[in-house]
Image (cartoon, rainbow, N blue to C red):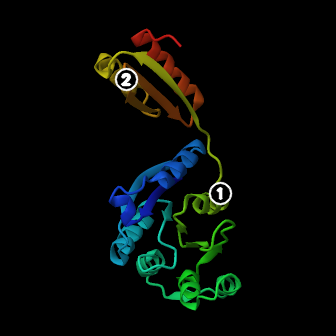
Amino acid sequence: MEFIIISVGNEILSGDINNTNATYMAKKLTKLGHRVRKIITVPDDVNVIAEEVRKASEEADFVLVTGGLGATHDDVTAEGIARAFGRELVVNKEVYEWLSKLSRNEEAVKKISSVPEGSEIIWNDVGAAPAFIVENVAVMPGVPAEMENTFGKILERFERASYYEDTVRVEGFEVKIVDKLNKVVEQFPDVQIGSYPKSGYVLVKFSGSDDRRVKEAIKKFEELVNAKR
């Protein structure tokens, strides 16, 4: 399956925090044999959220959104999702009743309980705001522990696909292997090949759904660069 990840938050765009949520989800999805088509970061802006979610919903099999589900003024993700699909933002009775037992702040409880009409609730075991799914979009809290908790439940819905990966280390600079690497890329279009320069060496990652083809690509590359593992 193809996924698009959308991270919501001015704090990410300003560089105040690292987008660890997107990295976490992308790694999990890739290891399960899925493809992350895009990772997008958007501000706490209802219209921008709505536009990007609407486009992503049409482009990918499934969209994963994190951030902006709290009780403060800049938590506007649920409103943005509702606008993306032309749905009303409504108070979910079960969430409202559960949160009312934890807090007497009526305004905060109502805000956190409000989701696009028809959403499926995914309960959050480590925080207040639940995740929810509407159409082919799952929306999760931005706090990493809460995202991981709800994402784990959502991930169970998707079948594991075949996936294999391995890396080759080549001493020296990337320019040393470019021509040879391009030959392998051309010969193995079904294998994902990435080159990652480090200090004094290059790591080349090979991955794909067919382990036989990935291993063949690695063997061919090692022969061309005389790499030893």
Front label number (1 vs 2): 2
Residue 99 quadrant: bottom right
Mark 2 Cα within 10 Å, few/some/many (few <14, many 20+)? Answer: few
- Going by the numbered disc 2, the residue's amino acid type is Ser
Relative to residue 137, is residue 13 drawn left or right?
left
Q: Which residue is mark 1?
A: 152
**Residue pictured at 59% horizontal, 29% vertical:** 211
Label 2 residue SS = loop
**Residue pictured at 32% horizontal, 19% vertical:** 173
Is residue 117 visible from the viewing direction of this image?
no
Q: Is residue 165 above or below residue 131?
A: above
Relative to residue 137, is residue 196 drawn left or right?
left
Horizontal and vertical percent for residue 34?
A: 54, 48
Q: Which residue is mark 2?
A: 199
Contact between labelled residues 2 and 1, with CB atoms less than 8 Å apart:
no
- Going by the numbered disc 1, the residue's amino acid type is Gly
Label 1 residue SS = helix
Horizontal and vertical percent for residue 139?
A: 53, 68
Number of marks: 2
Of the numbered discs 1 and 2, the one sitting upstream in the chain is: 1
Q: Is residue 103 above or below residue 147?
A: below
Horizontal and vertical percent for residue 229?
A: 53, 13
The one nearer the camera, 99 or 189, is 99
Horizontal and vertical percent for residue 54?
A: 40, 71
Is residue 191 visible from the viewing direction of this image?
yes
